[in-house]
Image (tube, coloured by chain):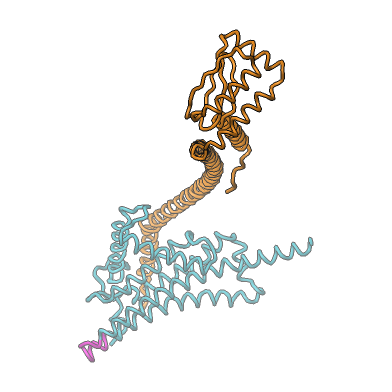
Chain colours: A cyan, B orange
């Protein structure tokens, strides 16, 4: 069994030169449509009253849960990070959980998707870092604690991005593969347990991905904060 | 190849588009609704707090008012009780006084009745005593006693001094010279002669003597002329004695009445 055969990238519906519309993209669009349509339907009649609909209640719990996590990790106002981290979590969760639908292949089982998301995190870290503390200050972080650490810092940045991509891809892909293998070996009942396990894994991986992304961004912010704090304390001491 | 770079780029673009759409359709709207609710809850809490404070103030106000009303009610009650006590004592005192007055009046009338009864009793008793005395003396009166009476009558005539005797004689002569001798029993002729002789001797020989019998005299003898009377009889003694007894009874009654009148205003009222 070739691993390529089970990647949704390989299921191509339409191709024109380098442009190919494969299952990954189609399922991603389907998920996007589902999410946007669902959000639009749920938030159509939002009310600020004390009584609220079930859908609104569910969405509020989800959104508020994500905000609370962001707040816990970053110790900052979460609304700035909410669209990025929240979308990462919701997209990965939905794409993983839909695996119970027959014929569906999770876009996250494609390394292209996870790589794309990991590159997104790789870009978001400097984006938030520079927006927060300025270009120079952010770049200076790579020279900490000494200039000799620069290559290691860069390697660390790249490797964690790679790890992020491969971790998600590996878990989801392996889940799908194991389910397929067990289906071939014992087609009755047993795959149900594997599916249930796959759902749990999918949920956990989505959580891990989003949390790690937030941790990386928060780390970039906190270095700056810690330095500012140190500088302030030193100034106070010298004046005192 | 495991990574299709077109797909990677396409997924990144897809992700950015999804992020923008969700931000618009989900996050912003949900957060706005939550903020609105939070704001509403906060304002309601503030309002509730204000209402609670107001209620507390109101309750404090009414508590104080209640206390004030209680205090005033107690004051009024105490005043009314004191007034009622005072009034009751006053009424009791008045009632006692009235009772005393009524009792005194009753005592007085009782006393008067007693007095008058006693008076009546005394009078009756005295009358009975005299009646019995008269009866007894009448029964006892015999010739011996009559003789003694005649003797004492004559000795009384004898004992008159000369001027008195002369005056009597003149007045008898002026009136016609007739004298009547009255006695309880009929006088014997010897006694009559004796008396006539004595009268002639003492008052002059020209006077005329007549004899009459008066049994109601009981015992005694009297000489009666117009405007003149010389007598010795028991009836007169007894009448004089009866007069004296009546006078002394009247005097006693007068003293009793005065004493009871003096006693009444100084009477003390008994205490509760």
Residue A153 appears at what percent x and percent y?
A: 58, 75
State whether residue B181 is above or below residue A85: above
Q: Quadrant of the N terminus of chain B?
A: bottom left
In the image, residue B141 sits, relative to residue A118, either above or below, namely above
Of all residues, the one furthest to the left in this rendering is: A188
Residue A218: x %, y % from top left: 54, 68
Q: Nearer the viewer, residue B109 or B270?
A: B109
Would you say residue A98 is visible in this rendering? yes
What segment carries the magenta color? Answer: A180-190
Q: Is residue B75 above or below residue A57?
A: above
Residue B263 sits in quarter: top right
- Residue ID at (70%, 62%): A232
Image x and y of residue B99, in percent: 51, 40
> Which of B164 and A192 lies nearest the eye of the viewer?
B164
Which quadrant holds residue A12? bottom left
Does B235 appear above or below A213?
A: above
Q: Nearer the viewer, residue A203 or A157?
A: A203
Depth check: give the residue in front, A18 or A164: A164
Prevailing SS of the magenta stretch: helix
On whether residue A187 falls in the magenta region, the answer is yes
Residue farthest toward the bottom in the current orientation of the protein = A185
At 56% from the left and 24% from the top, the residue drawn is: B193
On the image, the x and y values in percent for residue A5 come to: 28, 81
User: Is residue A192 found inside the magenta-colored segment of the image?
Assistant: no
Q: Give me the residue at 59% from left, 43% from top.
A: B269
Tell me if B93 is positioned left or right of B35 in this view: right
- Would you say residue B79 is visible in this rendering? no
């Amino acid at each position: 069994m070739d691993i390529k055969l089970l990647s949704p990238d390989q299921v191509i519906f339409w191709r024109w030169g380098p442009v190919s519309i494969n299952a990954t993209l189609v399922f991603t669009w389907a998920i996007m449509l589902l999410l946007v349509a669902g959000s639009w339907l749920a938030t159509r009649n939002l009310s600020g009253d004390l009584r609220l609909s079930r859908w609104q209640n569910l969405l509020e719990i989800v959104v508020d849960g994500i905000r609370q996590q962001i707040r816990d990790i970053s110790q900052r106002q979460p609304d700035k990070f909410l669209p990025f981290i929240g979308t990462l979590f919701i997209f990965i969760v939905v794409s993983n959980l839909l695996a119970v639908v027959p014929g569906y292949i999770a876009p996250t089982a494609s390394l292209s998707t996870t790589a794309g998301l990991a590159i997104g995190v790789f870009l978001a870290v400097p984006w938030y870092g520079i927006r927060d503390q300025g270009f120079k200050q952010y770049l200076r972080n790579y020279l900490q604690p000494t200039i000799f650490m620069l290559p290691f810092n860069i390697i660390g940045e790249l490797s964690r991005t790679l790890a992020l991509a491969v971790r998600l891809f590996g878990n989801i892909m392996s889940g799908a593969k194991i389910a397929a293998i067990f289906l071939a070996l014992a087609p009755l009942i047993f795959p149900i347990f594997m599916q249930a396990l796959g759902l749990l894994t999918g949920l956990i991986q989505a959580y891990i991905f989003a949390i790690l992304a937030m941790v990386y961004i928060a780390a970039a912010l906190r270095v700056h904060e810690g330095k500012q704090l140190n500088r302030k304390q030193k100034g106070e001491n010298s004046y005192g | 190849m495991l990574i299709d770079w077109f797909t990677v780029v396409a997924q990144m673009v897809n992700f950015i588009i999804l992020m923008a759409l969700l931000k618009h359709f989900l996050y912003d709207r949900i957060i706005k609704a939550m903020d609105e609710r939070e704001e509403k809850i906060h304002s309601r809490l503030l309002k509730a707090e204000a209402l609670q404070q107001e209620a507390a103030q109101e309750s404090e106000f009414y508590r104080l008012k209640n206390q004030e009303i209680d205090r005033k009610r107690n004051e009024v009650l105490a005043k009314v009780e004191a007034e009622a006590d005072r009034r009751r004592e006053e009424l009791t005192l008045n009632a006692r006084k009235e009772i005393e007055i009524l009792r005194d009046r009753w005592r007085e009338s009782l006393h008067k009745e007693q007095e008058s009864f006693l008076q009546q009793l005394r009078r009756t008793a005295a009358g009975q005593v005299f009646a019995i005395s008269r009866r007894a003396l009448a029964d006892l009166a015999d010739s011996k006693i009559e003789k003694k009476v005649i003797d004492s009558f004559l000795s009384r005539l004898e004992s008159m001094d000369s001027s008195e005797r002369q005056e009597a004689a003149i007045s008898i002569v002026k009136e016609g010279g007739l004298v009547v001798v009255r006695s309880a029993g009929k006088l014997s002729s010897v006694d009559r002669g004796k008396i006539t002789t004595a009268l002639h001797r003492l008052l002059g020989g020209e006077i005329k003597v007549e004899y009459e019998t008066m049994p109601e005299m009981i015992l005694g003898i009297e000489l009666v002329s117009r405007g003149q009377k010389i007598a010795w009889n028991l009836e007169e003694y007894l009448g004089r004695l009866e007069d004296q007894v009546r006078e002394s009874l009247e005097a006693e009654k007068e003293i009793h009445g005065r004493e009871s009148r003096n006693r009444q205003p100084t009477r003390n009222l008994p205490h509760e």
